[in-house]
Image (cartoon, rainbow, N blue to C red):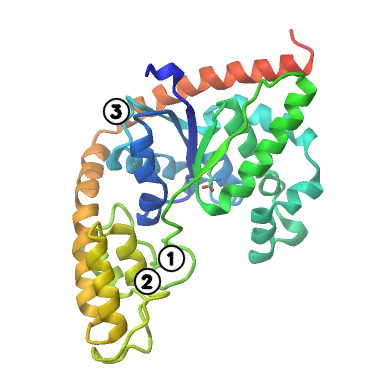
Amino acid sequence: MSSSSRPIILTGDRTTGPLHIGHYVGSLRSRIELQHTHQQYVLLADAQALTDNAHDVDKVRSNVIEVALDYLAVGIDPELSAICVQSALPALAELSMLYLNFVSVARLERNPTIKEEISARGFGRDIPAGFLCYPAAQAADITAFKATVVPVGEDQIPMIEQTNELVRRLNRQIGHRLLPEATALISPVGRLPGVDGKAKMSKSQGTAILLSSTDQEIETAVQRIYTDPNHLRVSDPGRVDGNVVFTYLDAFDTDKEEVENLKDHYARGGLGDSFLKRRLSELLKATIGPIRERRALLSRDPDTIMDIIRHGTKLAREITERTKVEIMTGLGLFRL
Ligand code: TRP
């Protein structure tokens, strides 16, 4: 298949911190596969990161390189995937502004992900306007690339739904199907909880295992993993459900049969946490070790990283500018 006839993927990450093993099992692994069959654009979403990090621009900027390093270290191949910087793609900002005229504040507030964040973070009416509007900005990202496949986590499904609403609305006004609808590709592995068993891995709370973690850091984090608080003696029967060691083993251990045996044994009693943690620790070290080494090697050559990002951004600029002109012309806006 020639690269130009391949279906287009847009995917990306907010540049708020280096990536962790949750990103690895949730999205990076599938991107490494998909880049062989799709035209893949990977967005370093610094502009979207600003929507709730305007007070910390340094963090957002410096993590553009950190996340790019993570991408390259895990095997996203710049020959196959374009790695691009969101804030360096003006068409995305222009389309975002345009799309805001095609969506109501009420609809943005009804977006389940936005709604949940507003209440979880206690934003109320003080929510940054950019944050409230990010579903429209993400629709701009997706449509500017004419992406039909968007690999994301469950929490991002409402963004794809809202994108497709906008696509239908714009196509109706344009008079033909200029923009394709997008399909969310949900990873078979759900979001990994933090080592403490809470919903999210957090670097600042030390509950994430990073792709750049050292062996020592991996071991320390694994020691902290939440298991079954009532499993006091090895001989006690243990709970498998909600036990983070098993959640991680399910995500990383390729010997599924052995994991099932371990679960049965643990539930019956007679299997200690330390045995499981040792197995997991070895597995994580074997997975992360080569990634960390490649990352360290790459980070010694910042010029090459910059060249890769510049090249990917240039390709992305061409396609997003083209789509922007098509949309503006299609809608009948004044053109000079
Ligand atoms: N919102 C996504 C996240 O938080 C990041 C993102 C920005 C994205 N633009 C995108 C993902 C476009 C897919 C497509 O993870």
State the image coordinates of residue 214 (x, y, percent, origin top left).
23, 58
Dot 2 amino acid type: Val
Residue occupying image coordinates x 78% and y 39%: 103
Q: Is residue 267 above or below residue 111?
A: below
Q: Mark 3 points at which residue?
A: 304
Q: Can residue 162 be seen in this view?
A: yes
Q: In this view, does 63 lie above or below 301?
A: below
> Could you say whether the residue bearing mark 1 is in a helix, strand or loop?
loop
Q: Name the residue under label 1.
A: 193
Marks 2 and 3, how far apart in space? 38 Å
Q: Do the residues labelled 2 and 1 touch (CB within 8 Å)?
A: yes
How would you rate the neighbour count of disc 1 (Cα within 10 Å): few for under 14, some for 14-19, many for 20 or more? many
Q: Select label 2 or label 3 by which is in front.
A: 2
Dot 1 amino acid type: Pro
Residue occupying image coordinates x 25% and y 33%: 301
State the image coordinates of residue 89 (x, y, percent, origin top left).
55, 27
Reading the chain from its start, which is encountered first: label 1 or label 3?
1
How would you rate the neighbour count of disc 2 (Cα within 10 Å): few for under 14, some for 14-19, many for 20 or more? many
| The N terminus: image quadrant | top left
Residue occupying image coordinates x 74% and y 7%: 336
Asked whether 266 or 230 is in front, the reply is 266
For this view, does 27 lie left or right of residue 56? Answer: left
Q: Does the residue labelled 1 lie within 8 Å of ligand 1?
A: no
Asked whether 12 or 48 is in front, the reply is 12
For this view, does 217 lie left or right of residue 164? Answer: left
State the image coordinates of residue 330 (x, y, percent, origin top left).
73, 16
Q: Is residue 53 visible?
A: no
Reading the chain from its start, which is encountered first: label 2 or label 3?
2
Marks 2 and 1, how far apart in space? 7 Å
Q: Name the residue under label 2.
A: 244
Asked whether 323 or 249 is in front, the reply is 249
